[in-house]
Image (spheres, rainbow, N blue to C red):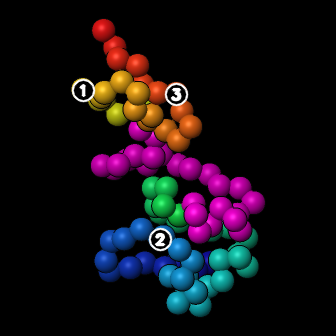
Amino acid sequence: MRIVVTSQRFQCLDRSLLFHVGIDPASVRIMVVKSTVHFRSAFDSIAEETLVVNSPGSNPCRHLDLDYQRLRPGVRLEPGGPPHAAQL
């Protein structure tokens, strides 16, 4: 098991971070990346399966769970999801 921890907070946007510390992402069986959705463009092509976990924090992966107060009609809360309809 190898764990990479950084002193600065940032998203794991591409595989170069892992190559820099000697890890080839395509060669590992299981990889966990703490990120919202930015990791997908770099890792979906080498992943057999992607599991998204909704963890607590200021920006959850599942925007349907947020309590919106004045969301305008037509906004999609998830990729490819239905457009939001105004509630009366």
Residue named by callout 1: 70
Within 10 Å of the Cα at label 2, are there few (<14), some (14-19), or many (20+) other Cα atoms?
some
Question: How far is disc 1 from disc 3 in space, using C-alphas?
Answer: 17 Å
Q: Say whether residue 42 is magenta.
A: yes
Residue named by callout 2: 12
**Labels 2 and 3: the sequence-earlier one:** 2
Residue contact between numbered discs 2 and 3, judged by CB atoms under 8 Å: no
User: What secondary structure characterizes most of the magenta part?
Assistant: loop
**Labels 1 and 2: the sequence-earlier one:** 2
**Labels 1 and 3: the sequence-earlier one:** 1
Picture quadrant of residue 40: bottom right
Residue named by callout 3: 82
Residue contact between numbered discs 1 and 2, judged by CB atoms under 8 Å: no
Picture quadrant of residue 48: bottom right
Residue 88 vs 25, above or below: the answer is: above
Question: How far is disc 2 from disc 3 in space, using C-alphas?
Answer: 29 Å
In x, y percent, where is residue 52?
Answer: 56, 50
Q: Which residues are magenta?
A: 40-63
Give left or right: position of 37 versus 25.
left
Write the residue at 45% across / 34% down: 76
Q: Amino acid at mark 1?
A: Arg
In x, y percent, where is residue 5?
Answer: 43, 78
In x, y percent, where is residue 22?
Answer: 59, 90
In x, y percent, where is residue 56?
Answer: 37, 47
